[in-house]
Image (cartoon, coloured by chain):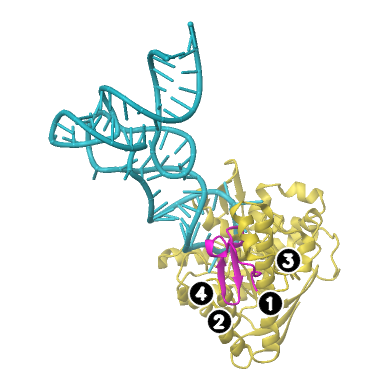
Chain colours: A yellow, B cyan
RNA sequence: GUGGCCAUAGCUCAAUGGUAGAGCUCCAGAUUGUGGUUCUGGCUGUUGCGGGUUCGAGUCCCGUUGGCCACC
C-alpha cells in the first residue's frame, strides 16, 4: 500500500507512493481541507487542475449535516461531491478540541451538542469507523482525543490511554465495517479503505513514545501525529513530532495533522513526515492573505490598491495569470466572491507546488539545501516590492 | 411671510451644565485535523458659524447660516 521510494541523505525527508482505492498519492503530499464535502470556494474540476492528490472530509461535520443516510443515498462521498480522487476523512477527534464547550467525553465515546441546533450527537470509536466506511473515504482516521495546550501531565496520560483504547476498538470496527463501503468509481478495485492511527501524548516525550508504540502494535496502514496546532509554540510542535516519529515504522506513511505554514511543512518533511493537511491556505485566502515564496501578502493592505503586479511574478495559477494585486484587493475589500476564490486557487497552487518541489528535492538528494533556501527567503509579513 | 424641529468623526447617531463617545467605514494585527464567522488594536472632531450667561457650555440665552416640516 505504501512504497518508500527514497530517503534523503542529510535529513529524514522521504519520497513515497501511497496506493488508495481512488488513486496513488505521491508523498510528501499536501491535502486541501474540505470539511463539509467541499474545499471552500473551489470546484472538483479546479482541484484536479491544481493536481490536488487527495482532499479531506470530516466525519463529525458530515454526520451532523447532511447525515450519513443522505450520503449513502448518493452512493458515498465521492459520488455525492463528484470528486473521483482520494479522500481522507478525519474522525471528529479534532472537534473534541475545537468544540470543547459542546461535548462530554466518556469511555464509550463523545457526546456532542451539535453546533448547528444543539441536537445530542454521539460518536463512538465504532460509529466513527462505520460512518467513514459509509462515506467511502480512502483513508479513515481513528477516533482520538485531541487535548488542548497547555495540558497537565496527568490529563495527557489519561487522554493518551483513552485514545489507545479507542484505537483498538476502531481497528476492530474497521475490519467489520469495511465491507459496507460503496464501490462507486474507484480506480483500484483491489485497494480497500486504509485506516490510520493517531499518536497523542501532548508535549511529553514518554507519552508520545508510549502512544506511538501501542499504535504500532495494532499495525495500522499509516500513522498520524495529532495533538499539534492546538495553540502551542512552534518549538513545542516540532518537539512533539520529533518525540513521535522515531517510534513509527519506516515502511508506513506518517501524517502530521493540521499543519502547517510553508516553512513548517519543509521542516516537518525533514523530520520524516509524509502527509499534511491545513486550513491555512484556504482560510487565510478568505481573509485576503496570499502565500508567496517571499512570505505572506495581506492583500487588504492599502499599499496594494494600485499594484499592477500579479500576487507572485512567476506563478502559473489562474489568479496570477490573469489578475493584478490591485484588482484582487478591490474584490476582497468589496466582499466579492471572486476575490476569495482567486486567492484560494493561488494559495492551494502554492502549497501543492511547494510539495512538488520538495519531492523533486528529495529525489535529487538535495532536500536540506532546498529547505534552507526556501526558509531563508520566506518572511512572515512581506511588504510590497 | 409666520411658527416649529434639526445641525456632534467620512456615514448613522449617543452624551443630568462637569475629561466628547458608540456602531459602520477606514488603517493594521490574529487565525494551523475550517464558521466567508470571529477576535484584537489604531486614526479621525475649531460639537454649522458669531456673540453672551457661568468657575465650567455639545447642553442655557441672543443672533446668523443651512436643511426639514406645518400653516398662510
Q: Earlier in the sequence, mark 4 or mark 3?
A: 4
User: Are labels 4 and 1 assigned to the same chain?
Assistant: yes
- Magenta extent: A284-312
Whether residue A280 appears in this view of the structure is no
Which residue: 49% across, 73% down? A237
C-beta proximity under 8 Å, tags 4 and 1: no
Q: Secondary structure at mark 2?
A: helix
Sequence-earlier tag: 3 or 2: 3
Q: Is circle 3 on the same chain as circle 1? A: yes
Q: Is residue A158 above or below residue B24?
A: below
Q: Residue at x 59, y 92 (%)?
A: A10
Which labelled disc corresponds to residue A377? 2
Q: Is there one chain holding both mark 4 and mark 2?
A: yes
Above or below, A326 relative to A113: below
The mark found on residue A314 in the picture is 1
Residue A326 belongs to magenta span: no
Q: Quick one: quadrant of the N terminus of chain A?
A: bottom right
Disc 3: CA contacts within 10 A as few (<14), some (14-19) or many (>=20):
few
Amino acid at each position: 500500500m505504501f512504497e518508500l521510494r527514497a530517503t534523503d541523505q542529510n535529513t529524514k525527508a522521504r519520497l513515497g507512493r501511497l496506493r488508495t482505492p481512488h488513486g496513488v498519492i505521491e508523498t510528501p503530499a499536501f491535502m486541501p481541507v474540505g470539511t463539509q464535502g467541499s474545499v471552500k470556494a473551489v470546484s472538483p474540476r479546479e482541484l484536479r487542475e491544481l493536481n490536488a492528490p487527495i482532499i479531506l472530509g470530516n466525519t463529525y461535520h458530515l454526520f451532523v449535516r447532511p447525515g450519513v443516510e443522505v450520503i449513502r443515498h448518493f452512493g458515498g462521498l465521492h459520488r455525492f461531491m463528484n470528486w473521483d480522487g482520494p479522500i481522507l476523512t478525519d474522525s471528529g477527534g479534532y472537534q473534541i478540541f475545537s468544540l470543547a464547550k459542546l461535548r462530554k467525553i466518556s469511555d464509550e465515546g463523545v457526546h456532542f451538542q451539535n453546533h448547528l441546533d444543539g441536537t445530542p450527537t454521539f460518536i463512538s470509536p465504532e460509529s466513527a469507523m462505520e460512518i467513514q466506511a459509509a462515506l467511502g473515504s480512502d483513508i479513515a482516521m481513528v477516533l482520538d482525543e485531541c487535548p488542548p495546550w497547555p495540558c497537565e501531565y496527568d490529563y495527557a496520560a489519561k487522554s493518551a490511554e483513552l485514545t489507545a483504547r479507542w484505537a483498538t476498538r476502531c481497528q476492530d470496527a474497521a475490519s467489520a465495517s469495511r465491507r459496507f463501503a460503496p464501490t462507486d468509481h474507484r480506480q483500484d478495485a483491489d485497494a480497500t479503505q486504509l485506516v490510520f492511527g493517531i499518536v497523542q501524548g501532548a508535549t511529553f516525550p514518554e507519552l508520545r513514545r508510549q502512544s506511538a508504540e501501542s499504535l504500532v502494535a495494532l499495525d495500522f496502514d499509516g500513522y498520524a501525529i495529532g495533538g499539534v496546532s492546538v495553540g502551542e509554540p512552534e518549538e513545542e510542535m516540532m518537539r512533539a513530532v520529533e518525540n513521535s516519529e522515531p517510534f513509527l515504522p519506516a515502511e508506513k506513511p506518517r501524517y502530521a495533522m493540521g499543519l502547517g505554514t510553508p516553512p513548517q511543512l519543509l521542516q516537518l518533511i525533514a523530520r520524516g513526515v509524509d502527509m499534511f493537511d491545513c486550513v491555512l491556505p484556504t482560510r487565510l485566502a478568505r481573509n485576503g492573505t496570499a502565500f508567496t515564496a517571499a512570505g505572506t501578502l495581506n492583500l487588504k493592505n492599502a499599499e496594494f490598491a494600485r499594484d499592477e503586479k500579479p500576487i507572485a511574478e512567476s506563478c502559473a495559477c489562474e489568479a496570477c495569470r490573469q489578475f493584478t494585486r490591485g484588482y484582487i484587493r478591490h474584490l476582497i475589500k468589496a466582499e466579492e466572491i471572486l476575490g476569495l476564490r482567486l486567492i484560494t486557487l493561488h494559495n492551494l497552487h502554492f502549497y501543492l507546488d511547494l510539495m512538488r518541489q520538495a519531492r523533486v528535492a528529495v529525489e535529487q538528494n538535495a532536500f536540506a539545501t532546498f529547505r534552507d533556501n526556501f526558509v531563508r527567503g520566506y518572511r512572515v509579513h512581506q511588504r510590497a516590492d
